[in-house]
Amino acid sequence: MTLIAEIFSQGAEIVSGQTVDTNAAWLSQQLAELGFTLKRHTAVGDDLQDLAELFGEIAGRADCCICTGGLGPTCDDLTAEAVSVASGLPLEFDAVAFAAIQAYYARRQRAMPEANRKQALLPAGAVRIDNRFGTAPGFALQFRRCWFVFLPGVPFEMKQMFGDWVRTDLLQRFALRPDTLVTLRCIGLGESAIQQKLEPLALPPGVVLGFRAAADEVQAKLLFPADVPEAERLRIAAEAAARIGDCVFAVDGLPDIKGDLVAVVDAALAAGAHSLAILETASHGLLAAKCLGRQWLKHAELRLHNETAGTDQQCASHAATLARALQAERQTDFALVQLYRVDSGRFDDKDGGIVLYNALATPQGVVSRQSTAHGAGIHKQNQAALLALDLLRRYFQNSCL
Amino acid sequence: MTLIAEIFSQGAEIVSGQTVDTNAAWLSQQLAELGFTLKRHTAVGDDLQDLAELFGEIAGRADCCICTGGLGPTCDDLTAEAVSVASGLPLEFDAVAFAAIQAYYARRQRAMPEANRKQALLPAGAVRIDNRFGTAPGFALQFRRCWFVFLPGVPFEMKQMFGDWVRTDLLQRFALRPDTLVTLRCIGLGESAIQQKLEPLALPPGVVLGFRAAADEVQAKLLFPADVPEAERLRIAAEAAARIGDCVFAVDGLPDIKGDLVAVVDAALAAGAHSLAILETASHGLLAAKCLGRQWLKHAELRLHNETAGTDQQCASHAATLARALQAERQTDFALVQLYRVDSGRFDDKDGGIVLYNALATPQGVVSRQSTAHGAGIHKQNQAALLALDLLRRYFQNSCL
C-alpha cells in the first residue's frame, strides 16, 4: 500500500524568500527512507485563513504530514490556532508543556516573558512532543485521513525532535517497509568525478544511486528496497567504496553511522587516548573551531596572512619541519601543520585557487599530503580545515587496516 | 490592490528531498520586491495528474505564478503537457523555439538528440521565453485568473531568463507598488524579549511587524506598504530601534544595507585603518574564523581548555589586564580578550551556561562587558565569538554617536 506524505512549512520568512526552506528537503529524505511516498511540499505565510484552509486540504489527501514553523511565542505564530480553526478542536492549556517552558527560562536565570505562555496551548487530544533544546513544544494529532506532526522551524530543534520521537512513532503507527540507505561519505573528490567512478557499478533492479554535495563532503547514496538481502547490500556497498577509493572516509548504514569527518577523526584519537597540537594558516581558526570540546586537542596556533613560498617540495618540507618541531615543543603524540600558497588569483577571489601543504608528525615519523582548494574564500577556508583533518583520518585508516 | 503570487516547483528531486529548492526563495524575493504578496510555495513530483490538478487550483486563486522545472527533454518533464491537460489548450510546435534548440547543439558541434524536439511544443497562444544558456525555452500564458510563467529548474538559466524578460514583463502587466522592508538586526536579546519591547509601538494600518531568529542574530522586520511616506518610515524605524536599545547593531533598508555583525565591525575598523589583536578561549577559533580575509586582524591567539576563575570582578579585571598586555605586546590599536567560566553544567551540555568576560583595549583605555551564553556547545561557541565582536561594535557605535 502506498502511504502518501506531504511536507508543510509555515512562515513569512519562507514564503517571502528571506529564508531558504531546508527543513522540507531534510524531512522528505527522512520520510522517503522510512518508506513514505512524498507527494507535495507546501509553504504559506502567517495567515490564519490560509493555514486553516491548507490543513483542511492536506487532511483529505495525505496519510502523514510533517509541519514546521509557527510554534513560537510571537503574534505571527499561528499554527496551533489554525489547527484548531480547521479541525474544530479547542485549544487547551498543557501544564506539562508550560512547566517545560518555565524550566527552560529558569535554567537560564531569566524571567519567562508572558508571551511564551501561549506556546503551552495545544489542540485538545493532541500528543505533546517535548523539545529539549528550545521553548516550543511540538504536537501531533489525527485530523481526518492525515496524521499531522507539528515541529518548530528551527532546524536544530526540529531534527532533534524528529529523531527523539517522531521517527519511532511513525514506524509504530504505519505499516512501513523502510528502504535501507547506505551512504558513502567522501572528501577530496567532486560529485561528477565520483559519479564517473561509479558508472560501471551494476545495480539490481530497484536499487537507486544518488549523489549529494554538501559543504563538508560529497555523498554517494545507495537506496536499497526492503527485499534486497543484507549480504547483497554489503557486497554492492563494498564494491562502490572500492571504486571510489581512499577518498571515502566513512560508510554509514551498514548498519552503524560513522558520522562526519570530525567524528571519524575524534573516534580514532579518543580510542588511543592520543594528544594533538595544530598550527593552522589558511583555515584561519576554523580547524580549531571544528575541534570544539575534543580533549585530545592540547594546543592550537594560528598564523594569519602567512602564505608560504618556494617549490612544492620546499613548502612540503617546510611543513614537515614545523610539524616535527611542534610535536617536540608541545610534547604531543601528533602535531598537524597546515601551510598554503595562493596558486592563482587571490585567496578571497572565487576564481582563485590555493595549494595546501599538510604535514602530520606521528610517533612513527612525518606523513605529508598536498591538496588544492577552490571557490569563494570561505569555501577555501573550510576545505583547508577539512583537508588537514583528512590527513589524520588517512593516517589512522591506513595504520589500522 | 493586493496582487497574489505563488511559486511552484516541479521535480522528483525536490519532493524527495534530494535537492533543496533554492529557486523558490530567490523568486519569492524578486516578486516581493516588485510588490506582489507571496501567498504560497508548492512543490510536486513528475506526475501528470498532480501537476494538472495543481495548475487548476493556482489558476483560481493567484494573479501570478512562477513555475520552475519540468521543461527538459526527458520523459519525466511534463510541464507543457500538464498545462495543456489543465487548460485545454493544445500543444503546438514552435518553429522559433526549435531553431534555437538546434542552434544550441550546432554551437557545441553535437547532434541534437531526437528527445529535444519535444521542448519546442508549447501550449497554443503561449508567449515563448528565450533561453540564452540552455536548451529549454520557457513560456508564459494567462489561464483563468493567473498569469503563469514557466522557467527551467536550473538556477542559472532561470535567473537569467527572469532578468532578461520576466521582470520587465511583470512590471508592464501589473499595477505594482513595491513595499519597503526595514530590518532591525539585534544581538544579545532573544526573539520574545524583543517582541515585548516593541509591543507599545503604534503602527499605522498596513505596516507589518515580523521577527526572525537566525543563528547569528535576531531580526525585527517592519514591512511598509508603498503609501507610507519616507519620513514616517524613518520615524517608526527610529522609535523601534530606540525601544529595543543598544542590542540593535544595524538597521537595514533605510535605504542601505549594513550587513551582519562582522560587516558592521569590518566597516568601522577598515574606515579608521585600525589594527586588532585577539585572544579567544570559549569561541575556540571561531572568532578568528569569522574574520577571514580582514586585513585589520594582525594577530590571533587561542587558549584551549582555559576556563578562568574567581569572582565576576576578578575575571573581568583579569581580562582587562590581558587586553592591555596584548595591545602593548602586539602594538595594535585594539586588543580584544575573551575569557569565560562555566556557570552551570558543562560547556558541551546544552543545559549548561557560561559567563563571558570580554575586554577591549582601545587607544582611550579598556572597555569591558560581561555576558552569558547558553544552549549546545556549538551555540555557546558561536555566541562567544559574536559577543566578543559585539564589544568592538559597541565601542565604535558609542564613540561615533
Image (cartoon, coloured by chain):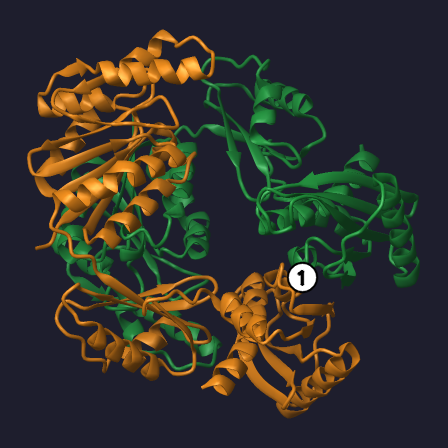
Chain colours: A green, B orange
Residue occupying the point 8% across, 21% down:
B88
Q: Position of residue B325 (x, y in %)?
A: 76, 84
Residue A115 in the image: x percent, y percent? Answer: 28, 74
**Is disc 1 surrounded by few (<14), some (14 to 19) or many (20+) residues within 10 Å?**
some
Q: Residue at x 70, y 26 (%)?
A: A245
Which quadrant of the figure contains the N terminus of chain A?
Answer: top left
Residue at the image position 46 percent from the left and 76 percent from the top: B188
Q: Is residue B166 left or right of residue A255?
A: left
Residue B387's place in the image compared with A72, above or below, is below
Front residue of A299/B399: it is: B399
Label 1: which secondary element: loop
User: In the rendered image, is residue A290 in sight?
Assistant: yes
Q: Quadrant of residue B118?
A: top left
- As drawn, B4 above or below B83: below
Q: Is residue B103 left or right of residue B288?
A: left
**Residue sitting at 10 percent across and 42 percent down?**
B61
The residue tagged 1 is: A293
Give the camera-side residue of B317 and A138: B317
Chain designation of label 1: A
The image quarter containing residue B247 is bottom left
Residue A2 vertical placement versus A11 (above, below): above
Location of the C terminus of chain A by quadrant is top right
Q: Nearer the viewer, residue B341 or B36?
A: B36
Q: Is residue A1 visible?
A: no
- Amino acid on which the number 1 mark rests in the picture: Gly
Q: Position of residue A52 (x, y in %)?
A: 15, 51
Residue B267 on image: x %, y %: 52, 70
